[in-house]
Structures are given as structure tokens and as C-alpha cells.
Amino acid sequence: MANNEPNATTTSAPSAEQVKTELARVLGSTVFAQAGRSTEFLRFVVEETLAGRADRLKGYTIAIEVFDKPPEFDAQTDPLVRVEAGRLRRRLIEYYHAEGREDSVRIALPKNGYAPTFTAIVPPTTMPSASKMRRTQRSWLLRGAVFGILVATGAIFAWFAWYRGAPTPVLNAETAALEHLGLVSGVGPRLLVMPFENLTGDASLDAVAVGTTEEIIRALVAYDIFATASTVSHSLDSTDLATLRETFDAGYVLAGSIRAADGGLRFSLRLVDTEIGTQLWSRAFDERIEHGNAIAVEDRIGATTAQILSSPFGPAYAHEIERAAGRPTQDLDPYECLLRFYGYMRVVAPTGHADSLGCLQRAVKAEPEFAPAWSALGVVYLHEYLYAYSPQPDRAPPLDRALEAVRTSLDIEGARRMAAVALAAVRLASANRHGFNAAVDRLSTIKPLHPAASLFLGYLLIESGDWQRGTPMLDEALPLATNVPCWVYVGYAFRYLETHDYGHALEWSLRSDAPNWFVARMTVTASAALAGRTDIAQREKARLLELYPDFESTGRAQLAKWNLDPTLLAALLDGLKLAGLKLA
């Protein structure tokens, strides 16, 4: 980017010796201390590039030379190198946000290849102030502190970072290096985690307070959330919140405390919006520290907190969605388009589908390396096929477009959770049971599996007839969603329709808060008729026909596209017929 400001950071090409020194510094850092494959990967590609052999750095060569794969290794079908390259990129980003933030040489691995780039950072004589940077740059700058952690959500649910196209900003050395990496703004909620306060008066629990703080941040990172830690506690009054927002560029503060309660300990957490000070979420964990179980307690609190806060169906994303709501889709940037999609996925209304479709199509055109948008677009295309939403008859068939979008997301970042779930959904709709089962098996290798992904996968398994596996996934993930998507309750209703428990099917289907999703209304109609509740069945049938006037003539064909379990499909059709619908 051109920049003629007198105090702007400049870059140049470092010497080979400078790069070797920087490589040794990076590999000796704590980020790479136990990096395993990433260490050997980075050393190999840097040494090959310095030796003038960058053109040899292909997926096959790296698989053979670094990962000891056999000569018959197929780099086109095996994503090993692409996945490891993504991990290496994230480790480099994490390093340059923390230990390496003052380094004068930066090593980066671009997304379009395996040959690293080397940049020498020449800092300006006068650093611009934080307020000036905000006035001149639209994007939220990624910050680092004690833990300085960045990952890429998601998902369902995040996540990838990109530059939003600000007009000629004044950059400092840190920001210039991030821009060089293509990572200037962070996607997703930006959390500042306060140190847990030990209010028990027992100094021996200070270590537990520190450990709990660290485990929350570690778990947030595992779920692709950018979290920064403050080394000192702050009050959460409006003055301090404004300072924290300015200093750490944090949209949210997570504060916690430990106090004695009923012979045990109560760990209390609350999430606060730094803009207006609204408390968005709180949670208490009652635990006992005994027999050396402190680490297990810290792990449990960290994992649960991260699962809730990283979910697109959780409190942080709900606030993000609300802030982007009501604005014309043409005014939304790619991340905000993703938020619009998350909002749509809670209620699955046709208007939300149309908004998401146009917004996401623009998003991937503007940011073709934004993997979450491709995953979301794949789901939107899938819903075009399944529900006849926003048809595009002049384009390729929607299932083909859905598969291509999901594959694009996986090509960009092979370990993305929601893309893997979306692939399973496309395979099921395509009547490719072998591919569906393979996608489900692949998901089992992605650890940890995001609770939003667990909800989606559980729903798909129930649709396929495997409610024995699908229901426990819903049971486990449901308490972690503070804004439960409507299709989760429909999934439970399907589970009980499959086992002819019509009373429970009706009970669960009525919980689905989706007044404009015809599938929810159809499920209530069928369940009510089978459960003998004619009044509910007739009311819901009328609403179904308002939403889908041609349902009697085309509904059976639409249902056939879903490739439902035969028992489930028969129950739905029986219930709809009993409600008086004459399906063609």
C-alpha cells in the first residue's frame, strides 16, 4: 500500500542472515516450543527459499520432505499440507502478536502458496496515537498483550481476518506487518479477559484464579476467538470501560471472581459490552477444589465459557448481530454479512435468506479468501434447494453451487468445522449416504467440535434416521446456546416422530420460534394431528398454507429432496394427511 505520510512505517527486503536470525528467534519462542510439524515446516520452507528453490515448494514436495509421506502421496486429495500450512500461518500470527511484536524482520506464509515472504520493518520516528489510528482506519486493529493470542468459528460458528479497505491509513510497525500478512482486522467478538479475582481470603487459591483465567483464554483460542488478557483488574464502570475499549480495542470484557459458598467455591463470570456497559451474560459455577482436582475444574470452566461465548448462537454474537441488524445489506462489510447469515440461521425465514444470499455473494467477491463466508454461502445455496428460497434459475443447480462453495471454504482452510458440517448437509441432500457418513467421520477428527457444529450435525443425523447418535449431540450442545436456533427443536420433534412418540413430538415442535419457516409449521401440523390435537393441527395448517400456498401440489416433491429417513417421512406424511392436507 502506498503511503506518503512522513511518519509512516516503511518496509524493505531483509538479508539472508537477518532472515536466518529471525527464523532462529521464531523457532525458539514459546509459541513454537511444542509446535512439532509447524517447526519443521517453517524451517524447511525458509531454508529452501533462501537457497533459491522456492519454486520447489509444492504440496507434494513438502509432504515427502517434511512429513515423510510415501512417494505415492496424492496432494490433491489429501489436505494434510494445506491444513498444516494453515496452522503454521496461525502460529506466525500469534508469535508476531506477542513475543515477536518488536521484531524488525517478519516471516509470513501467504495463503496462495508455500513460499514464505520476508519483510524488514523500519519503524517511524513518531508513532501515531491510538485515537488518530482509529480516525484514519475503519477496521479494528488486532491487539496483543500478555497472552497475545490469535486464532481464526466456528461454527458455525470464526474466524478469518481481513482488511476492510480503509483510505490510506497511517500505520505503525505492528500494523504494517499485519497488513503484509493480509490480517489487519479481527473477525468476531474481541474479548478482553480480566484476571479472576480471588475474594475468598485464601491465598492458596490465587493459583486457581490465575489458572482459570488462562484456561478460559486457551479454550477461546481453540474455538477461534481472539482473546486478549489484562494483567491487572479494572472496575467496569463507564470510565474504565471506555479506557479498556480504547487501550485494548476490546468490544467485550469478561470478568470473573471466586468466592466461598456453601462449603465450596463459586466461580462467577459476566460479559459486558464496552461500548455502553450492558451486561450481556453471566454464569456461576459451583465447584469444590479437593484431591488435586484444580486443573480439572479450571479446564471445565474454561471449556464451557468458551463454548458459550464463541457460538454464533451465544450472547456475544447475538450482540454483534443486533448491531448490524436493520442496515441495508449493501452497506455491510464481509464480516457483517456473516453476522446477517447467523441471524438468518436462528429463524430460517425467506426474507433473511434473500438478504444473506446477496450479502454473502458480494462478500466472497470482495474477500475471496474469507473461508467462513464461503461455508455460509454453501448453506444458503443448500436452503435454496431444500426450501425453494430465493431461486436463481439462471445459474447452476443450487446443490452444485452449494458443494462448490463448501469445497472452496475447505480449500482455504481445511480444518474449518462449519464447512465440514455443511459438506455433510450437502451430501445428505444429494442422497450420497457414503459421502455423508465420510463427512461425519471427518468431523469426529476435528477437536474440539464447536457446539454450533454439534447442533447442526445432530440435526442432520436425526434427519438421516440416526437419532441414537444425533439426539445426544443436541442434548450436549443445547445448554450452550443462549439463542437456540429454531431447527434444533424441529430436530427433537423429528426424533420423536421417528419413534412414534407423538406427544413429545408436538411438545418439542411447539418450542420452535420460527413463525415464517414453513418446515416448523409443517412439523407442528403433523405432530398435532398424530397426537390428537385437532385444534392445533388446523391452526398450524392454515399458517402453513399462508407461507407455502402450493404446499398441497408441490410439498411432497419438496419433502423428497430432503432424503429423510423413511420412517420419519412416513410419519410426516401421515400426520399431514390426517390434518386434511391433500398432497399430490
Image (spheres, helix red, strand yellow):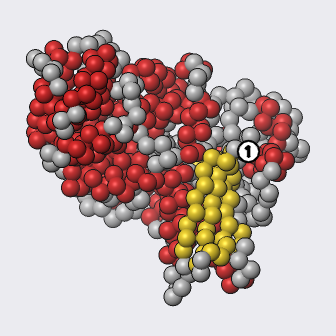
Q: Which residue is at 30% across, 42% downward?
A: 507
User: Does 442 sit left or right of 88 as displayed?
Assistant: left
Amino acid carrying label 1: it is Gly
* Picture coordinates of residue 76, whole percent (x, y): 29, 45
Vertical position of residue 309 compared to residue 545: above or below: below
* Picture coordinates of residue 69, whole percent (x, y): 30, 61
For this rendering, which residue is in front, 580 or 81?
580
Indicate the quadrant where residue 5 lies: top right
Structural crowding at the residue carrying mark 1, measured as other residues with C-alpha within 10 Å and reported as few (<14), some (14–19) or many (≥20): some
Indicate the quadrant where residue 517 lies: top left
For this rendering, which residue is in front, 73 or 35?
35
* Picture coordinates of residue 279, whole percent (x, y): 67, 48
Q: Quadrant of the N terminus?
A: top right
* Picture coordinates of residue 306, whole percent (x, y): 53, 57
Q: Which residue is at 70% across, 65% downward?
A: 195
For this rendering, which residue is in front, 470 or 218?
470
Q: Quadrant of the C terminus?
A: top left
Q: Which residue is at 69% across, 39% downward?
A: 140
SS at circle 1: loop
Q: Which residue is at 31% across, 20% downward?
A: 543
Q: Where is mark 1, residue-wise?
A: 277
